[in-house]
Image (cartoon, rainbow, N blue to C red):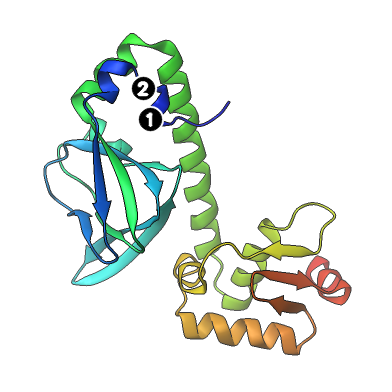
Amino acid sequence: MDLLTPADLPPELQRCTQHRILTPGQILVQQGEPAQYLFWVATGQLRLVGFVKQQMITYYFVAAGDFFGESVLHFDTYGCTVIAEVPSEVIAIPKAEFALALRQSPNLSERYLASLTHRFHSVKILLELRSINSARERLLHYLMQRRSPGQTTVAVDKPLKVIASELALTPEALSRLLARLQADGIISRKKRSITFSQKGLEDIAK
């Protein structure tokens, strides 16, 4: 089933939505603020972060086509801060009206459940990655997950700083790891792709 989009919302709910334009670094919502909306990303990319003892922790990123803020249906405040990484447009959907629409439309509820399942799966993969202690093995696991069966090339469709954040690495550490894997003959790199050598795939499979 396709994931939920604002076009799937009932017309009366679509009329209640708001479009918000964000510049890089602009905060959409703050952790602890009253939760009034959930959001859908029309364009751009945003980072969801939390703060523990004044340290910022990145949870994950959302990009065009993603819903986020689903927890507002069950909590009174936002559980994280959301920051635009690049120029972005989001659609804000009022939670009370959205909750009512879910109760009235089984089809909307089913599509929303599909979107939630997709999100939970993405977060599970992210947690799995971050549980790997070796940064080298973490990176290789990340790349192998994105390799299509039978293919040796992985498309790089995100900035390296985003990939680094997902892997709980600094951009500098990620660049060093990629350079070392290339020097070891495991991969070769182009601007928007990474290709495994046959030797690299054999070594990983051992």
Q: Quadrant of the C terminus?
A: bottom right
Residue identified by numbered label 2: 9
For the residues labelled 2 and 1, the Cα–Cα distance comes to 5 Å
* Residue toward you, 153 or 201: 153
Q: Looking at numbered disc 2 in the image, what kind of residue is underneath it?
A: Leu
Is 46 placed left or right of 151 in the picture? left
Residue at position x 73%, y 58% in the image: 147
Residue at position x 49%, y 56% in the image: 127
Numbered disc 1: secondary structure: helix
Q: Quadrant of the N terminus?
A: top right
Q: Position of residue 69 (x, y in %)?
A: 30, 41
Is 47 placed left or right of 18 in the picture? right
* Residue toward you, 116 or 86: 86
Q: Are marks 2 and 1 in contact (CB under 8 Å)?
A: yes
Q: Is residue 72 above or below residue 156?
A: above
Residue identified by numbered label 1: 6
Res 15 → quadrant: top left
